[in-house]
Amino acid sequence: MVEGPGCTLNGEKIRSKVKTGQEVKQVRGSLTNKNNSETNAFHGFLGCQYTGVETLGKELFMYFGSRALRLHFGMNGSMSLNPAQRKVTTGSAAVLEIHLTNDTVAFFDSTVEIRLTEDCKQKVRAMESLDVCSSKFSFSRSEEAVRSQSSRMLCDVLLDQAVMPGVGNIIKNEALFDSGFHPAVKVQLLTDKQINHLVKMTRDFTLLFYKCRKTGSALYKHYKVYKRPQCDRCSHAITVCRLGDNGRMTYFCERCQKGDPTGVDISQLPPRNSLISWTYNERTSDDVAKKEEEDWACQLCTLINQPTAKACDACRTPKPEAHKDDISTEVSPFTADLIKHPCNAFKKPGEELKVNWRSAFGTSTLVFSDMSKKPKPVNSPLSLAGSHLNSLAAARGLYKNSFCQGTTSPNYASGGWQKQSAELSKRESLASYSHPSKKMRIDHSPSPSNKAQNGAPNSGPSAPCCASHCRPAVLRVVHKEGENKGRQFYSCSLPRETKCNFFEWADLHFPFCHHGKRCLMRTVLKLGPNNGRNFYTCSFQKGKQCDFFQWAENGPGVSILPGS
């Protein structure tokens, strides 16, 4: 689901790159290809002028004079500005493309409706103070809206777009964990102070969500319970179930999240290592980078200078003075502070190794940084050399500012460094050596151990290897409608462009139901003693299923977290 922060960023992208006043030249897409009165209405926008865009929670409104388009991105919706002409593959066709005088806006896998501009603007003005992604968010009004839902469960209240627009399932689960409340707790059991804390934790994780999406940082590193097998705080197994009016997937820790709110002491809750101090307006925390710790750009020559430089290194232009904007924290908590996320560190590495790489297009410099904080062994002979990293480089014939001739340099770009490090590890202990990290390349992809937790296909230890690449295959599920829907299979783990045709069913050891069909493996999502257990059941649709049932033992797919 594209939650509020993603929709807000889409609106900001349109607002910054698409100028108002442009005329609609063409409207096309899969919605306009259907022959009915609703789709023909989209052609009525031809000749209209684009006048602006606004967002409210998960909704995006584009205004064209007296009429507007209301867009909802759903689970996998996206948008593209001025998309390049390319070969359209299956499932990649745009739902709606709006061709303006100078720009083109394309929407994919989204719901589009035609509304009146006046109605949309009135709705935005009436609810923008409840939008957790809005700069006009009001804590007092949001608390009042939550308090009015006294008989409902917290998991339902947070997802209600009429109460807290923009909150999605990820924000809901993480905010409830930070607040220390069980998802099934009723609002009427909370005190005013606890409701205030819940709203602040919801707003806090929403801002963290927004920051990560805007900067390209990995949001999954901040998950404490969502799609995690164990609690990040107490290591207890995460409970996964369908809870609430709509049966949304819910993740929570039974130890850290209390069913009785009277047992929750807000002052004793451990703070999240992100924006907690920002939400509480405590700007003295070490999690927030100070202004003097940020690089600054010269206004004359645009050179990026070090934070400690008082003047530009190139043209000697003095460093501009920082101006403090008077922004109300109640109305607009979005500030210019640079937040120190756990995956970032605003300090210079202890040691760097620079290697010049000569290629066909010129000479590039690879900077290897030793980010390890492990102390050096006292008896290590490398400590006498002054720098363990430099000694490793010297052992390979690499020194600072040295050229890598011939076929040596490609090894550093294609993994040769890791191969040589592996050979070196046979002669050195792991305690005295850590792989240096490339400063030029930052990989935010989840580790293999976290793939199952973040929705990626999971390849178990018994997964077969594809014949062409000899790589472990990945476990996938058939989503195509038909008799095999829901079945698990192995396929090549490489991207679609380079993958081979390897295929193997992973459920050949599954039992057969009374229809003689291969069973499907499902997971108990109801709260109770069997929550999280896997079982075999008939693969037919409801109403046609037989009464076959059998608990599943260990096998492919059993270790996959429910809801992944």
Image: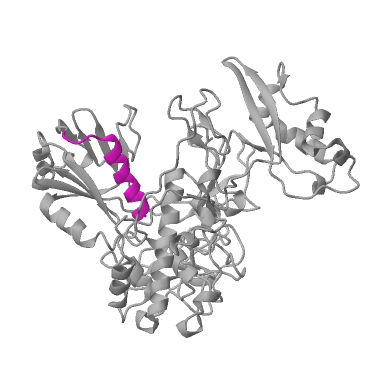
Residue 240 showing in the rendered view? no
The secondary structure that dominates the magenta segment is: helix
On the picture, is 43 further left or further right than 514? left
Nearer to us in this view, 150 or 542: 150
454 up-or-down from 540: above or below: above
Q: Which residue is drawn at 28% across and 68% down?
A: 163
Q: Can residue 418 be seen in this view?
A: yes
Residue 426 position in % (x across, y down): 84, 40
Residue 369 image offset from top left, x and y in percent: 68, 37
Within the image, what quadrant is residue 123 found in? bottom left
Q: Which residue is drawn at 61% across and 53% down?
A: 449
Residue found at x 90% / y 40%: 381
Magenta stretch: give its range: 1-21
Q: Where on the picture, by quarter, is residue 157? A: bottom left
* Residue 524 x/y as whole percent: 48, 71
Task: Give percent across and percent down for residue 61.
Answer: 21, 49
Can you say whether 115 is above or below 404 in the image? below
Residue for point 76% across, 33% down: 420
Q: Nearer the viewer, residue 506 or 492?
A: 492
